[in-house]
Amino acid sequence: MKRILFKSGSTMMGGLEKIQCEYINFLADKEFNIKVVIENDNGNENILEKEIKIKVEYLKNYEYISQVKKIRENRKKNFFSRIKYTIALFNEKRYADQKFLEIYREFKPDIVIDFDSSLTKIVKKLKNSKNLVWIHSSIENWKKKKNKIKRFIKRLEEYDRIICICKEMEEDLLKLNNNLIGKTEYMYNPIDFEKIKILSVLPFDEEEKKLVKEKFLLMVSRLDIIPKDFKTLFSAFDIAKEKGYEGKLYLIGDGPDREEVEKMKENSKYKEEIYLLGRKENPYNWMKKADKLILSSRYEGFPTVLLEGIVLNGNVISSNCKTGPKEILAEGRGKLFKIGDNVELSKNILKNFDINFKENFLEKFNRKAIFEKFLKILEE
């Protein structure tokens, strides 16, 4: 029986985290000898831990994470606080890498799955296993600085297989480093559409019932202002309201930049009609009820929320960012707008949609076919 060591970043609510549960549970059902290592123990925010069928092991416990968080929050106080934060970041990464290597030596895996591509600096030390890495985002947008991009894609050469989660992402990666030709594969994220359809009809609590009686736009997103463009979203909502849109705007999700998003909201003319609802374990009944589902991003990995929106709602709007929205919403399956174009987004908010969605489009995201492909990769 193959021994598989699966590494990822967290069990908090998020797109990557939901997909990692699918892969882990599939491997567990296939009775591989699998060990799951998660970098960050976020305490009560480990929402998805209960979705994983086997026990996970955290590299950094909640106390350690809390200490680093306090240093991060105080980093802007003065010069010494910034120095302390820089040192803490360096030590944090080194601490996690050392603990992972200890587990690696003890577990002796045949295969390592680096699901959040966080092992690139130590992959050379993983000499006794076949090593797979997942790429979940457009590297040029994710890394920004050219020297960081160059170092990252060079380190990818040390892996045996590199999995990109959409075709556009694989094409972009090979343009950056043609030495990776023959090592890459694109494989869409497996989505349990039947499960989300069931969740989408679950009842709301009493407070939620009051909110869903209203007409509303919805964005389901981590509150992270680097990839997510809330400024354009709020501005477009203001324009649409000025032109007669009668609904409200709800945001489901949480994240490190909640305070910044709250400040952006306060600058909106129609701030009283924008609601930050926080994290919801089941966003699918909200998605089904929404007037339109919006994704306003500067860059993405492969936004499964758009696929979920197509299946549950049909009225889906997204920025035409890298990577994924163009593949998902092509052929009239939704509306795309230019990144940062609040006027174009507002027009889409006001439009009545004529969606061209065919069920056979979902076949390429069929979980069974994706998992069969995954098994073949593991067997190579």
Image: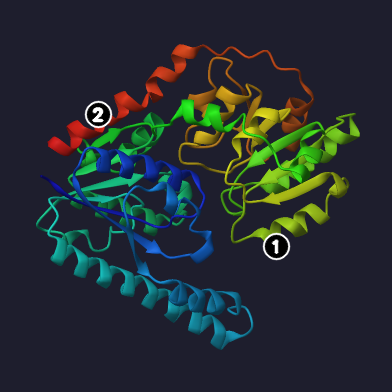
Image coordinates for residue 319, horizontal then vertical, percent:
61, 34
Q: Residue at x 54, y 35 (%)?
A: 305
The answer to whether residue 337 is visible is no
In the depicted structure, whether residue 354 falls above or below residue 214: above
**Quadrant occupied by the C terminus:** top left
Q: Is residue 284 left or right of residue 218?
A: left
Which type of secondary structure does the marked residue at label 2 adopt?
helix
Q: Is residue 247 left or right of residue 88?
A: right
Q: Is residue 111 left or right of residue 279?
A: left
The answer to whether residue 183 is visible is yes
In the rendered image, which residue does mark 1 sit on? 259
In the depicted structure, whether residue 343 falls above or below residue 34: above
Q: Which circle's residue, 1 or 2, is located before the other in the chain?
A: 1
**Quadrant occupied by the N terminus:** top left
Which type of secondary structure does the marked residue at label 1 adopt?
helix
In the depicted structure, whether residue 189 falls above or below residue 232: above
Q: Amino acid at mark 1?
A: Glu
Image coordinates for residue 79, horizontal then vertical, percent:
57, 85
Q: Amino acid at mark 2?
A: Lys
Q: Residues within 10 Å of mark 2 (few under 14, many from 20)?
A: few
For the residues labelled 1 and 2, the Cα–Cα distance comes to 42 Å
In the rendered image, which residue does mark 2 sit on? 373
Q: Which residue is more in the foreground, 79 or 274?
A: 274
Q: Which residue is more in the foreground, 228 or 15?
A: 15
Q: Which residue is more in the foreground, 175 or 85?
A: 85
Image coordinates for residue 214, horizontal then vertical, percent:
82, 34
In the depicted structure, whether residue 356 falls above or below residue 166: above
Q: Is residue 27 left or right of residue 215?
A: left
